[in-house]
Amino acid sequence: MESPETQTTMEQAIVAPEKIERSILMIRGLKVILDADLAALYGVSTKALNQAIKRNEGRFPSDFMFRLTVAEKDEVVTNCDHLKRLKFSPVLPTAFTEHGAIMAATVLNSDRAIKVSLFVIRAFLKLREMLSTQKEFALKLEDLEKKFSEHDEKFKIVFESIRRLMGPAPVPPKRRIGFSTCQEQQ
């Protein structure tokens, strides 16, 4: 039996976590992996993956997978260098959500698909965690901006007061020296 360290090293050799993370896209507000990327990760052809999915359609409701529109396909091909090969494909790619990617591993039922599905799950979880952290950071930044905008107004008043104090003192009216005439006193 293999040690846990050897097993982890072997699993990492199967697929690089960065490759999985790079394959996760945001489409329709969902984190998904396209069929071509999922098939490559699971070590099967895209055609074989799609055939297995077709044979098990009942396991793939719309929240597990969906077909991209032409516009979505064009955007993905334009923005993702590793998907350039899809540009001339007459078939629209299928996008798998986290649950769909896991279900695909179960219908393929190969050792590699099952092992890689664990990495896929971890990549989705890592992405979810990163997005959560990013939202928390954005909220904290917004709070800081509000606090400083209030302080800025207060500091503005303080600085204006200091500038007035730093300015020249008002000159008191000068007293005339000498005698005044009666007309001046009246």
Image (cartoon, rainbow, N blue to C red):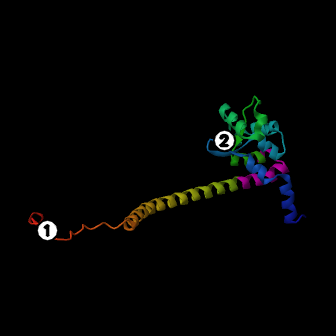
Q: Residue at x 64, y 45 (%)?
A: 30
Q: Quadrant of residue 43?
A: top right
| Mark 1 nearby-residue class (10 Å; few <14, some 14–19, many ≥20) | few
Residue 121 falls inside the magenta stretch: yes
| Mark 2 nearby-residue class (10 Å; few <14, some 14–19, many ≥20) | few
Tell me which segment is drawn in magenta: 106-123
Element at label 1:
loop
Q: Position of residue 184 (x, y in %)?
A: 12, 64
Residue 125 falls inside the magenta stretch: no
Position of the C terminus by quadrant: bottom left
Above or below, comparing residue 101 to residue 91 in the picture: below
Q: Position of residue 13 (x, y in %)?
A: 86, 55
173 vs 8, left or right, is: left
Q: Which mark is residue 180?
A: 1
Q: Nearer the viewer, residue 85 or 44?
A: 85
21 vs 162, left or right, is: right
> Would you say residue 75 is visible in this rendering?
yes
What amino acid is found at the position of numbered circle 1 in the picture? Ser
Marks 2 and 1 close (CB-CB < 8 Å): no
Q: Earlier in the sequence, mark 2 or mark 1?
A: 2
